[in-house]
Image: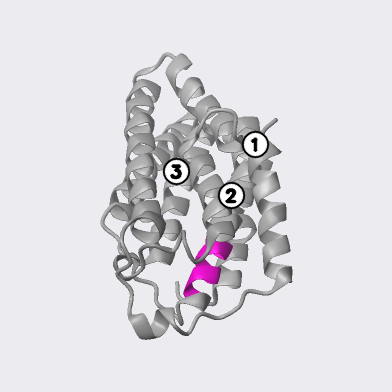
């Protein structure tokens, strides 16, 4: 879905794409009387988790990589609901709102500065030009992959543990899917971070010479979201 990056941040973090999860959580007493529907949610959630992380590995558009990671994280929340762990799904939904809004706003800042270029293959070396955005993007990336003691670690690890200890055939299958998806998340996140910030400069010299300035309000917003990504899980 095309749109301005701040709108994408709002939609992916807190409104449109998370409405289905919130609806299932609110209607959990109804779903508990339909075990077959819960199994269906469990399987669809696992497939969605793997699908989103797989597609993100092949994307070169910065915003699309982050968007497909949202699809993968929604899969985690869905199969958590399918395992009747609604509180864990809500916990991950809250943490996801912080680090996904942070990643999208960082992407928006990068796209704004590089004069609307979104292909990560045409970035490179931005750590020297945008050290602050690199720092907060790194926080968001580490939270996304579930780095220990960040907010994403507590909620995602809890979802995987719930799948492991549920002791049925479907949950065991979903457990291995979730572990594979977590590995793919680390892969495409590292790829995105490396191509954007750490590799040699691949961008057009003219665009690099026309750097725009990011306002203090955006930097303040990124700082707040980075703080939430660090501590919302504790």
| Earlier sequence position, callout 1 versus callout 2 | 1
Residue under pointer 1: 91
Q: How much space separates mark 3 and mark 1, taking CA atoms?
A: 14 Å
The percent coordinates of residue 138 (x first, y second) are: 51, 48
Crowding at label 1, few (<14), some or many (≥20) Cα neighbours within 10 Å?
many
Residue 123 in view of the camera: yes
- Residue 194 among those drawn in magenta: no
Q: Secondary structure at mark 1?
A: helix
95 versus 137 height, above or below = above
Q: Secondary structure at mark 3?
A: helix
Protein image colouring: one colour
Q: Which residues are magenta?
A: 104-111
Q: Are marks 2 and 3 in contact (CB under 8 Å)?
A: no
The percent coordinates of residue 233 (x first, y second) are: 66, 34
The percent coordinates of residue 97 (x first, y second) are: 62, 51
Q: Secondary structure at mark 2?
A: helix
Nearest the eye: 61 or 69: 61
Residue under pointer 3: 75
Question: Where's the C terminus, which quadrant?
Answer: top right
Residue at 72% across / 53% down in the picture? 224
Left or right position of 81 against 182? right
Q: Main secondary structure of the magenta part?
A: helix
Q: Are marks 1 and 2 in contact (CB under 8 Å)?
A: no
119 versus 152 height, above or below = below
């Amino acid at each position: 879905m095309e749109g301005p990056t701040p709108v994408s941040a709002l939609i992916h973090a807190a409104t449109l794409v998370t409405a289905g999860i919130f609806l299932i959580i609110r209607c959990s007493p109804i779903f508990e009387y339909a075990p077959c529907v819960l199994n269906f949610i469990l399987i669809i959630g696992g497939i969605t988790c793997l699908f989103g992380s797989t597609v993100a590995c092949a994307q070169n558009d910065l915003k699309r990589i982050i968007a497909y990671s949202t699809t993968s994280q929604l899969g985690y929340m869905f199969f958590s609901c399918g395992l009747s762990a609604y509180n864990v799904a809500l916990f991950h939904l809250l943490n996801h709102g912080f680090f996904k809004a942070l990643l999208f706003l960082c992407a928006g800042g990068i796209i704004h500065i590089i004069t609307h270029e979104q292909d990560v293959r045409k970035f490179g070396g931005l750590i020297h030009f945008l050290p602050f955005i690199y720092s907060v993007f790194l926080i968001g990336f580490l939270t996304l992959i579930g780095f220990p003691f960040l907010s994403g670690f507590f909620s995602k690890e809890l979802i995987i543990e719930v799948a492991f200890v549920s002791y049925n055939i479907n949950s065991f299958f979903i457990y291995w899917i979730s572990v594979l998806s977590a590995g793919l998340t680390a892969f495409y996140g590292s790829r995105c971070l490396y191509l954007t910030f750490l590799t040699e400069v691949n961008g057009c010299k003219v665009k690099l010479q026309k750097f725009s300035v990011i306002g203090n309000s955006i930097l303040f917003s990124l700082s707040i979201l980075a703080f939430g990504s660090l501590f919302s899980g504790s």
